[in-house]
Image (spheres, coloured by chain):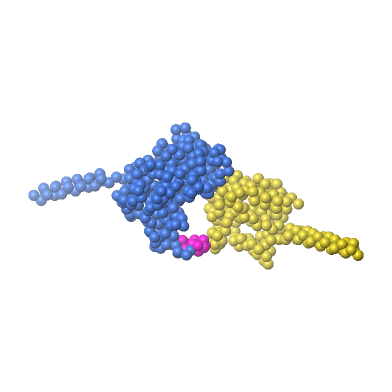
Chain colours: A yellow, B blue
């Protein structure tokens, strides 16, 4: 009877461990699959029931090459880099250089869309030059109605998956390590799968 | 008799008018030469420029986090770095100045780093030192900083390591928030570093202090197209969006002092900004305006030394994303 009781207790404990393990695994996979869509930075992106659709840009974008109006092409994954003159310039150049070295022309399913919020073309060209960023940077005009520009901390990095926001990342000023971790552990892992 | 008096009148008229034209000197802004930064050195912009008595240049580029020392005699550039002496130093230069036998780089936390005059690294500033909006080296190895911190707007006399000796300075209290939040104005010293001259961002009033911090003179200039602001930023304004909106209203058709620097022989340069137009003014210690002109859009004023004006120009290549290095252009007022 004593043996039976002990066996019963052990079985319950093992069962509880298994159940919690199953829950942890389910939780992990559901988190990985979830689309985190509660952010609507500068109304660039239309939000609809917490799902964000970048196919509807609410501002016009222009190319820093020839100042002509452009519509960026979105692929399965899109890495949007929001830049601003009010942002930390060394952080912005560091982030552009990192993105360029990790992703430029390496993935067919990824489009990189750097957007400078403002039409100070000289600032865009300076950022490009210092970071040795090879792609064209898009920029927007007439941002008077977007007061977020003064309160947000730039750069802001957004990873989209099939036009839906997946991750939003704000690099920190002091170190590039969190940025490297984000690109390698989250972005690269996602797009390489 | 009538003819005789007429002759005397004509003679006096010619004499006095010739005397007036002799007394008035026609000043002109004259371009001298330019300094090219070689393409192998990549810089985004020249955020700040300091010049020493020999004409050597200290160029700070906040964007590429670089400070370049240009030696006039060898025509060579040296990139300053604290890495050899202080590995791991968080290098984020804001601006840099020649400081006697040293070079002082004002940095964004830690707030300062010292280099030897030849550009070799030396040591960080005292940990108590905080970066001011402007800093100058006065005589007797003293530093003077123009601070806009939580304690208000103040001038601090410091030793060469940045330890505060005493504070001084007269600031208009009814514009304290504007002075604190809006960059502009300046702090400068004469050739011998005997006097300290200060001008705030909101009004063209020159304050002259001696090395004991005593106000010895004060002059107000009446500058071309300068319209002073009427009111300060609201006291309780902390929200950056509301501050930006308030600033837009305050600055509508109004002017600010963008730069203030010593020129030579008790003459000063004031650069003002009115409705996105820049004006340069040459003034003297007696409160007289000697020369005024609008600055062409393509150039921007950096600093002055020994009667020379240093401007920066950014060349462009049409329909290209390649940006050449900015050029330093020297002018003088003759």
Total marks placed: 0
Magenta segment includes B140: no
Q: Which of the pair A77/B220 is nearer the observer? A: B220
A99 on left or right of B118 = right
Residue A83 is situated, as x and y percent measured from the top left of the image, at 58, 54
B109 on left or right of A103 = left
**On screen, residue A58 above or below A187:** below
Q: Main secondary structure of the magenta part?
A: helix
Q: Determine if residue B94 is in view.
A: no
Residue at position x 72%, y 55% in the image:
A76
Instruction: Check the image and name the residue furthest to the left.
Output: B1
Residue A44 is situated, as x and y percent measured from the top left of the image, at 61, 60
Residue B232 is situated, as x and y percent measured from the top left of the image, at 42, 62
Instruction: Check the image and name the residue furthest to the bottom.
Output: A49
- The quarter in which the N terminus of chain A is drawn is bottom right
Residue at position x 67%, y 52% in the image:
A182
Residue at position x 20%, y 47% in the image:
B16
**Which corner quadrant of the image does residue B99 belong to?**
top left
Magenta segment includes B244: yes
Instruction: Check the image and name the residue furthest to the front.
Output: A2
Chain part drawn in magenta: B238-248
Residue at position x 59%, y 54% in the image:
A155
Instruction: Check the image and name the residue furthest to the top.
Output: B74
Q: Which of the pair A108/B111 is nearer the observer? A: B111
Q: Determine if residue B75 is in view.
A: yes
């Amino acid at each position: 009877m004593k043996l039976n009781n002990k066996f019963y207790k052990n079985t319950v404990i093992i069962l509880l461990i298994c159940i919690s393990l199953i829950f942890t695994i389910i939780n992990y996979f559901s988190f990985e699959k979830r689309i985190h869509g509660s952010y609507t930075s500068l109304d660039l992106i239309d939000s609809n029931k917490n799902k964000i659709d970048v196919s509807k840009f609410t501002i016009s974008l222009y190319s820093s090459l020839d100042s002509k109006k452009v519509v960026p092409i979105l692929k399965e994954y899109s890495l949007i880099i929001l830049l601003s003159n009010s942002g930390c310039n060394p952080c912005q150049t560091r982030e552009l250089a990192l993105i360029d070295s990790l992703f430029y022309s390496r993935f067919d399913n990824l489009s990189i869309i750097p957007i400078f919020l403002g039409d100070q073309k000289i600032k865009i060209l300076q950022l490009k030059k210092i970071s040795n960023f090879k792609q064209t940077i898009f920029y927007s005009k007439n941002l008077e109605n977007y007061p977020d520009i003064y309160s947000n901390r730039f750069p802001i990095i957004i990873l989209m998956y099939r036009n839906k926001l997946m991750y939003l990342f704000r690099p920190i000023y002091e170190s590039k390590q969190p940025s490297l971790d984000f690109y390698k552990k989250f972005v690269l892992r996602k797009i390489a799968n | 008799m009538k003819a005789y008096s007429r002759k005397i009148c004509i003679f006096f008229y010619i004499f006095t008018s010739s005397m007036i034209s002799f007394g008035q000197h026609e000043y002109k802004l004259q371009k001298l030469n330019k300094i090219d930064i070689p393409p192998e050195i990549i810089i985004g912009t020249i955020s700040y420029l300091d010049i020493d008595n020999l004409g050597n240049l200290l160029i700070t580029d906040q964007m590429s986090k670089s400070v370049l020392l240009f030696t006039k005699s060898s025509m060579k550039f040296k990139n300053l770095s604290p890495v050899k002496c202080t590995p791991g130093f968080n290098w984020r230069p804001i601006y840099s100045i020649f400081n006697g036998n040293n070079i002082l780089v004002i940095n964004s936390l830690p707030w300062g780093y010292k280099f030897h005059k030849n550009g070799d690294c030396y040591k960080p500033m005292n940990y108590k030192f905080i970066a001011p909006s402007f800093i100058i080296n006065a005589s007797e190895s003293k530093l003077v900083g123009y601070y806009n911190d939580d304690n208000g707007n103040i001038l601090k006399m410091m030793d060469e390591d940045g330890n505060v000796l005493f504070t001084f300075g007269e600031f208009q209290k009814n514009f304290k928030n504007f002075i604190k939040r809006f960059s502009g104005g300046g702090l400068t010293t004469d050739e011998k570093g005997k006097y300290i001259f200060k001008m705030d961002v909101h009004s063209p009033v020159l304050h002259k202090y001696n090395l004991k911090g005593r106000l010895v003179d004060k002059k107000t200039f009446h500058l071309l197209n300068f319209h002073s602001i009427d009111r300060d930023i609201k006291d309780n304004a902390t929200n950056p969006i509301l501050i930006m909106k308030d600033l837009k209203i305050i600055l509508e058709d109004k002017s600010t002092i963008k730069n203030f620097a010593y020129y030579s022989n008790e003459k000063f340069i004031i650069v003002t900004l009115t409705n996105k137009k820049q004006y340069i003014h040459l003034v003297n210690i007696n409160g007289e305006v000697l020369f005024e002109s609008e600055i062409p859009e393509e150039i921007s004023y950096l600093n002055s030394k020994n009667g020379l004006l240093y401007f920066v120009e950014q060349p462009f290549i049409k329909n290209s994303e390649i940006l050449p290095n900015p050029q330093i252009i020297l002018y003088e007022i003759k």
